[in-house]
Image: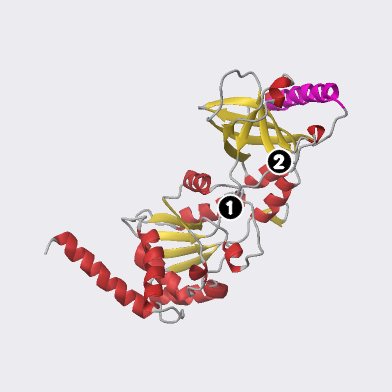
Amino acid sequence: MTTDLAAMLFQSRNLSYYVAKHYNKLGFDTTQRDTIIMKYRQQLADAAPERNTIVTIGVFDGVHRGHCYLLSELLKASPQDHDTAVVTFINHPASIINPDFKVSFLTSTSQKVELLKDQGVKIVIPLDFSKSLSEVTARDFAQMLVDSLNMKGLVLGPDCAIGRNREGDADLLEKLGLEMGFWVKTVTPFTDDGRTIRSRVIRESISNGDIVQANTLLGRHFQLSGTVIHGDKRGRELGFPTANLSINNDLLLPGDGIFAAWAHINGKRYMSATSIGIRPTFGLSERLVEAYILDFSGDLYGQNIDLKFVERIRGQEAFPNIESLIHQVNADVTNTRAILTALEGADSD
């Protein structure tokens, strides 16, 4: 028997034992149990940590200042011979538990992973939250973390609870930790002017067009990324050719209006007057993201643009004629240039 085959058989036997021991309370038949444990254990094991880990868990949508504080506590709590790991979710758990709950995300999964690693986290594991995962007990989930990630410590945010019906609060997890060999630390809320920073609050600010407030809570510019697609070329006809961006439908768009934003294209940064809305002057109803890139000429179709929003210049308006629209767009471009020029030396984004 080869070494690899022996290892596979050993893993298979351990897995069968794990399923029998830890999944006999979920109400699934053996096949369903095997499927559940294989799926999530494999996703965790794919991270292949070579050392013991200190773990935190959460959605981390936006990776805002509150999240960054939690991550800094994770890093401080991790011994030098341990790796830090974040277990996060591709979809929002609340939308699975309550199908009527709808959420638009501040960050895509790939952007979230990048931002988490920018904070110094070694391992990021995005899981697809499902109904079956929501029914896993706190004990079972903690055991998976211990077995798959060699977890020796668990750092919790102030509202964090894991397992079926959120049963795994700090008290229960501390008891489980004594059994399974990991410690638990709960981090206090991070506040701004006495208010706890939450992704929900940032979403509200962005939906209302309050980009300045959202950026303050995020600790960085709110960002949208998209591919340039063909539009109806109305901007070009008006003398302001715009790049129409195709944005992931799961992402949150700011409230309608005109925004000063930085546009990152092929590693270079440009000023952008960006419009979000339905263009009521033309009687249209589809919400579009259109970026007029200042001091740029060239073909952008098919290219990716990262927009980093700085400030809302004005709300969406319907104009009585094309002349008044052109006059206002000229003013928007002037305002955009003034806002971004004032920040150019200090703004690294």
Total labels drawn:
2
Helix, strand or loop at mark 1: loop
Q: Earlier in the sequence, mark 2 or mark 1?
A: 1
Question: Looking at the rendering, which quadrant does residue 149 occupy?
Answer: bottom left
Any mark on residue 61, and which? 1
Q: CA distance from mark 2 to mark 1?
A: 23 Å
Q: Residue 326: percent from the left, percent from the top?
A: 80, 22
Establish if 162 lies above or below 341. Answer: below
Direction from residue 284 to residue 291 in the image, left or right: left
**Does residue 58 show up?**
yes
Q: How is the image coloured?
A: secondary structure
Magenta-drawn stretch contains 267: no
Dot 1 amino acid type:
Asp
Image coordinates of residue 176 in percent, x first then y, are 44, 76
Q: Amino acid at mark 2?
A: Arg
Q: What is the crowding at mark 2: few (fewer than 14 residues within 10 Å), some, or many (at least 20)?
A: few
For label 2, the SS is loop
> Which residue: 63% across, 46% down?
218
Q: Nearer the viewer, residue 58 or 291?
A: 291
Question: How far from the left and from the top, in percent, is residue 186?
Answer: 54, 65
Residue in front for this viewpoint, 80 or 124: 124
- Quarter holding the N terminus? bottom left
Residue at the spot 37% in from the left edge and 74% down from the top edge: 31
Q: Which range of residues does the magenta coloring cover?
A: 321-340
What predominant SS class does the magenta segment belong to? helix
Looking at the image, is 175 positioned above or below residue 253?
below
* Residue corresponding to mark 2: 287
Q: Which mark is residue 159?
A: none
